[in-house]
Amino acid sequence: MAAAARGSVWEIQPGDVGAAGFGAADAGAFLAALRSAAAAAGPGAAGDAVWAAVAAAGVLRPEHPHALHQLVYYSVYAGWDRAARGPPPYWFPSPTDSRQTNLGRFMEANGPKLLGPAYKDPITSFNLFYKFSVENQEVYWSMVLKQLAVKFQKEPKSILSTSDRSKKGGTWLQGAVLNIAECCLLPCPSLNRTDDSTAIVWRDEGHDDYPVNRMSLKELRSQVITVANALDTMFHKGDPIAIDMPMTCNAVIIYLAIILGGFVVVSIADSFAPQEIGTRMGVSKAKAIFTQDFIIRGGKKVPLYSRVVQGSSSKAVVIPATGDYLGVTLRNGDMSWKDFLCRASGRSSIYSPVYQSVDALTNILFSSGTTGDPKAIPWTQLSPIRCAADTWAHIDVRPQDIFCWPTNLGWVMGPIVLYSCFLNGATLALYHGSPLGRDFCKFVQDAGVTLLGSVPSLVKSWKAGNCVKGLDWTKIRVLGTTGEASDIDDNLWLTSHTSYKPIVECCGGTELASSYIQGSLLQPQSFGAFSGASMSTGFVILDEQGTPYPDDVPCAGEVGLFPLYFGATNWLLNADHDKVYFDGMPIYNGRQLRRHGDIIQRTVGGYYIVQGRADDTMNLGGIKTSSVEIERVCNRADERLLETAAVSIKPAGGGPEHLAILAVLKDRSAQYDVNLLKSKFQKAIQKNLNPLFKVKHSLFLCRGQMIV
């Protein structure tokens, strides 16, 4: 911190303001405005009331040095007792603005009818309404479905049926028939979406001074139909078809076309090594794979097609990363993007979507398992509805919003963001390049992004590079974060650049198609903490004997989810679903709880903090992986190794986990350079697993002592 926090906001002196990088001539005026805002909270006001008053007054501005934001925030909360009061909040819902949120409008329209005289307003009655959504899921979901661009060819006979006890999660939308990709592509009067509405805005890296590109809904639909027509000439309905490429406009078009045509998307992250690509192609039995010749990142060309070729013999359709021509020579049997599109020539521009039951398989995603094999997780047409409904309720995705969340279709956030935009009438914002630097941050400004998502490692990169300096991010009204633990100071930096907009923390899983805990715009938000469960989601925290703690008691333990969970999986392609998610879990209120694997803490004040995993899964850069996967690779890094153990370390101040590798040598009397060992581990992981995983620490056992 450039300037140390004072004991309270009243103790800050002009010299402190100057030391924080604020101009000396203006320090007095700033301090007077700060004290005036703090005084509005009233005599002897607690830190949260003071911070609320300071934030509302707009005393701190995005262009002010971060050290000044630190000085004020940490001074305001210098005397805050976390043990007695819980995490300090930094954002507070406004009574006026809360009524304009999706959930607020929904509650104002339906709260009196559903809750009777107990209903007061969206903020006061939020907890009561959340409880109603858990206990009356059929009512809640029947109403929320009407808020989304979901068009059924056959309406569901029921919202939820629990008659089949073999389906622990229940049967949802029984009898419903639709095509969820078609729902993304049609005009929707209730969302003010027309053919002329902007569906996607994007920019290519290296064109950062050019205007952003725009694609209308009509143009998107036309391109999706072209790809679907070409697919029909090559594949049979139901065939799994993989996508291994950055989340570009073409990737989104291919994704929607596969589902529109009645095929199944196989999602593979573009960072995977050849062996990991091959594993996922084999498990899914994918018939082909769409990929790029290269990935453009920070001005560099990173080979992608060559990794696909090493990993799989399946047919590849290859798209040029830049321009119209490929930068690689294709192997026999593979096809260029241009030749693929030519297969649609002469076919009708009107396409008949393949309508299927709501539980039809549309997407195979992967999540790490504790055995080292990735779990093949099926998404049905329920899954997109769930993720769009959750972002509608919690991130407040509205029609005409511009939503940007740099991710990949190989990770669960890719499909979540895609469906969250298209089923809520928002515009999807895509940057074709690295999201780590200023060029991406400038795109956020130029595209007019109103909803911005990230992972903490990404925010750390923006902060370290001072990437937002001179840019205007004040159009952003909601921020989102997921994937790993947040760093409090990084999030202070992030929200300060948007004039202190809320950061919605999200934590869930691929198999849930959503987050089970996250923030809400109807509750105060605290850095690095979740303010509650997702709407309609019930859970308990279990002690070491598997007994649930009372709902209002601060505690820590493994989370047990209520099994009736709209959109969650009820089968796996390559594992026993019941064994993975239910075996050994206790019965609660007559139903067996669903395992998720997180250890969470409920704090004083009712916030939640994820403490880690109950299994050996770790979170590295927002990617969940198993220690077994890493150990399998590291064990082969050097012939002198007997065995290795991969562990993740939580930094003392919070934030993303660090990867450490512990090694045991075959000859414990041997001398070994620990830095060389660390380098070998890093190279092995990058080559065989994922180049995004960074080894922070390496240790080995020598003569019974641990050497760093």
Image (spheres, grey):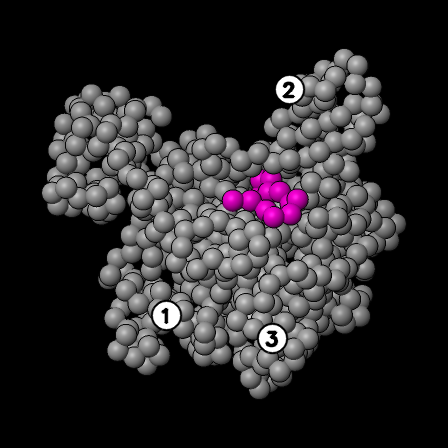
Element type at mark 3: loop
Quarter holding residue 394? bottom left
Give above or below for 171 relative to 395.
below
Callouts 2 and 3 close, C-beta under 8 Å: no
Instruction: Provide the residue designation for mark 1.
Output: 129
Q: Is residue 164 above or below residue 64?
A: below
Q: Tag 3: Cα neighbours inside 10 Å, few (<14), some, or many (≥20)?
A: some
Q: Nearer the viewer, residue 410 or 327?
A: 410
- Cα–Cα span, label 1 and label 3: 22 Å
Q: Which residue is mark 2?
A: 708
Q: Which residue is more in the foreground, 654 or 552?
A: 552
Looking at this view, name the residue that lies furthest to the right. 332
Q: Amino acid at mark 3?
A: Gly
Give the left or right position of residue 92, taking residue 681 as reference. Answer: left
Looking at marks 2 and 1 on the same chain, the residue that comes earlier in the sequence is marked by 1
Q: Determine the residue positioned at 47% across, 36% down.
A: 654
Q: Residue at x 45, y 74 (%)?
A: 135
Name the disc covering residue 170, or none: 3
Image quadrant containing the N terminus: top left
Give the amino acid at mark 1: Phe
Amino acid carrying label 2: it is Val
Residue 409, horizontal then vertical, whole percent: 62, 53
Q: Earlier in the sequence, mark 1 or mark 3?
A: 1
Residue sitting at x 45%, y 76%: 136
386 within the magenta span:
no
